[in-house]
Structures are given as structure tokens and as C-alpha cells.
Amino acid sequence: MKIGENATWMARDLNVVWHPCTQMKDHEGLPVIPIRRGQGIWLEDFEGNRYLDAISSWWVNLFGHANPRISNALKAQLDELEHVLLAGFSHAPAIELAEQLTRLAPPGLTRCFYADNGSSAVEVALKMSFHFWRNQGQVQKTRFVTLSNSYHGETLGALAVGDVELYKTTYKPLLMAAMVVASPDCYARAPDVSCAQHSALMFEQMAQTLAEHHREICAVIVEPLVQCAGGMRMYDPAYLTLLRDACNRYGVHLIADEIAVGFGRTGTLFACEQAQITPDFLCLSKGLTGGYLTLSAVLTTPTVYDAFYADYAAQRAFLHSHSYTGNPLACRAALASLAIFDSDDTLEKNKVLSAHLARALAPLQENPYVSEVRQIGMIAAIELVQTRVPRTPFPKQQRRGLQVYQFALQHGVLLRPLGDVIYFMPPYVITPKEIDFMVEIALRGIEHATNS
């Protein structure tokens, strides 16, 4: 490796690449980091600098970069079959993965529909719910209910049922109108109210919406337990229990978007397990392949499946497809990732890591610029504020979170704050010592950003 290689790759990048969720002009002063290789929780650039991947490369990596077990499974699959269409054809990895997912998912989810990515999975669930009611003769059911501050992706249907204004304001003329109900976000609870009490109290608005409008509603879509892109805001499983009961009572589907929170992030394999509920649609992606390849799946019930099962003349088939649907390589990576959960007792080991992370974060509870430290499983977040009482955010234009990001990069940690929310969602192969390092750098970054 030569000194200056990073600069060479950065210049080439900026000549041709348009980066996602990025104001490209920022890169006049904020360098793009070209990554040469990854190993475990570490990324390495072209000059040998290393960065601890504290956010699992946008929440996708579960068992570390270049994991030998997943890599070897992919190498073997490459020599057998790289891809075949899934319309009229099938292959072992797609069948085996569907068998595994329907076995592991909440009871009653017996059918697996593949797509390419998280947004596509949400599109599938929305269309499938709408089409189900149409097949049932209930053509008046055309609307969806979502929570405030929710995020479900950036394709048009997924964007329409999200509520993070940063992403959707510009495109509102293109979007269908969803019903927005107040989030059960426990950050907003009163000091003497528990998270469970607050979440139950906030359900009253959802209950009223369903009571008044259920005849026109296809489905309610939620991110179970954590609104990730909305600032890692968290709520209690009690809300999901109440929501499942209400959806049953009013004949409305429940879509659980576990794209970010599935596969152990919240402490259970699926977040819905903590409320002991089964949604009508379970959307999965991100960690599904362990961070290797793009793949998503929508799991659903026999009732939904049967509504589309008919003679050709009935014209009731669900017509939705992607060229790489159920790609064998992606399915094989997913199978290898699921095998690691079994062989390594991952969920139990994560309990130890989660407890260590909580202890490491405890000192931040007293920081005058931190209004809340919150955690569920292997997701933790620190909310920065200008003042704690009353809670006063920093002016957005000051970009304090960005200052933390820059400081952390200079000291070997990849953080990517959501505004002024510093969060951690590391791969499960992180060690307690690496957790301590990650949190220490974040703490120093917060001190740097809040004292400037």
C-alpha cells in the first residue's frame, strides 16, 4: 500500500459516483473513505487505516466482514448455480431458505415471497394486502395506517407509508396519502410514566383510527419496537399486543417491517416475539444474508396465500417480480448466516454483549448534553441535546452529530449518526474490549462536538 492511494481513489470516486443519502457538495471538505478490505468488525482503507464498523455497514452485517463460513458457502454455490429465474423454476437454496424462515418465524407464517431489498419487501406487502382485499371483494379497502416518525424505505409505496419528512417532503406529490397515527415512542413519555404505560396510552389514537376507518383500511404497518431511521426511537411490546388484537377485531392486516430489527437485533430473533404476536406480513432483509448480498423476503399466512390461489381465468394471481428474485447466491448466504445462529448460540451470547454495552454506556447518563441513553438488545442510541431540562435540541445547521462522525473516523470508529442521535448497531462478533473502545471514542467525540 502506498501513501496517497486513498486520495487517488477518492478523486476517481467523486468523478463518477453519486452516493446515497448524501449532499455531494459536503465531500468538498468531508472525504469519502475508500475501503480496500474488511475483516470481522474492522474495515481497512487503501493506506492501512482501520475503522471499527459500529453500524454494521447500514445495519446489514451480522457476523463480521469476510466471514469464512458465509464466504465458503458462497464459493461452493458459485460452482453450482449463480442464478435462474424463479418463475416456473426453483432451486435448492430458495426452497431450503423458505423452509427455514417459515420454521423460525412467528407461528402461522407459512409462505415466503422473495424480493430484492427492504423497500421492495415493503412494496410487496402493501400490494399483497391491497390485492388480498380486492380478491375478497372489499374494493373499498385502499388505505394504509402508519406511525409518525416511521421509515419503511424510499421507493414510492414504501416512502408513502413512512413519516420522516427529510425523505418524503420533496416527493409528496407522487405519493398516496397514508393515515398517520402518533408513535408510541417512549422518548416522549412523562418522567413518572413507564415505557409500557406510555405505549399503551398512545395506542388510544390507533384504536380510534381503526374504529372509525377500518372499512377503508387495508393494513397498519409498523417497525416493531424500534423506529430506526427515525432516530432509533423505541417503544414497549405492549403496543404490538394491543395492535394485533385491534387488527383482528376490525379486520385489518398488520404488516411488521422487521427489515432493520430482525435477526437478533432486539434480543430475540424477531422483534414480534417479544409481544408474542404473529403479523399478517413479516418483511425481512438487511441482516437476512449476513450482510453479503441483497435479498428480502415477505412471510405471510395461508389465509393470504389462499386468496390468490385460483384458476387462471379468475385473474387473481399476485403479479409482482424482480429479475433476481430468490437469487441462489443470496439465498445460500442467508442459509449460512442462519446456520451460525444455531452453531454459535448467537442470541445467548448477544445477551452478554448487550449487558456489557449497557454498562459501558452508563456514564453517559449524566452527561449534560445527553437527554437519553436507550437500548434494546444490540441496538443502543444516545440523544444529544443543547439542554436536558427542558429538552432543547441543538440547531440542525450546527450538525453536531456530523462532528461526532468526523471525530470518530479520525480515531478509528465508523459511526453514522442520525442527526444528533449517536447510535450503535455493531456486528455480533464484536468483543467486550472492542465495545469499550467503540463507546470511548463515541464519548470523546460527543465531548468534542458539544464543547465546540
Image: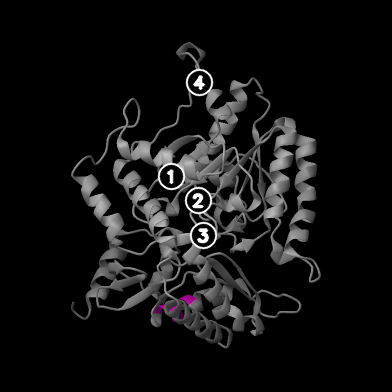
Judge from the rendering whether residue 260 lies leftward or rightward of residue 116; answer left or right.
right
Q: CA distance from mark 2 to mark 3?
A: 10 Å
The answer to which of marks 3 and 4 sits earlier in the sequence is 3
Residue at screen point 44% across, 70% down: 54
- Residue 248 vs 379, above or below: the answer is above
Tag 2 residue: 259
The amino acid at mark 3 is Arg
Residue 326 visible somewhere in the drawing: no
The answer to which of marks 2 and 3 sits earlier in the sequence is 2
Q: Position of residue 18 (x, y in %)?
A: 36, 58
The answer to which of marks 4 and 2 sits earlier in the sequence is 2
Q: For the N terminus, which image quadrant?
A: bottom left
Circle 2 residues within 10 Å: few <14, some 14–19, many ≥20: many
The answer to which of marks 1 and 2 sits earlier in the sequence is 2
**Discs 2, 3 touching: Cβ within 8 Å:** no
**Discs 4, 2 touching: Cβ within 8 Å:** no
Tag 3 residue: 265
Q: CA distance from mark 1 to mark 4?
A: 23 Å
**Tag 3 secondary structure:** loop
Which residue is at the front of the view, 174 or 259?
259
**Tag 4 secondary structure:** loop
Judge from the rendering whether residue 169 lies leftward or rightward of residue 390; answer left or right.
left
Residue at screen point 64% across, 19% down: 137
The amino acid at mark 4 is Tyr
Q: Which residues are magenta?
A: 405-409
- Dominant secondary structure (helix, strand or loop) of the stretch shown in magenta: helix
Which residue is at the front of the view, 94 or 321?
94
- Residue 356 vs 12, above or below: the answer is below
Tag 4 residue: 309
Residue 269 visible somewhere in the drawing: yes
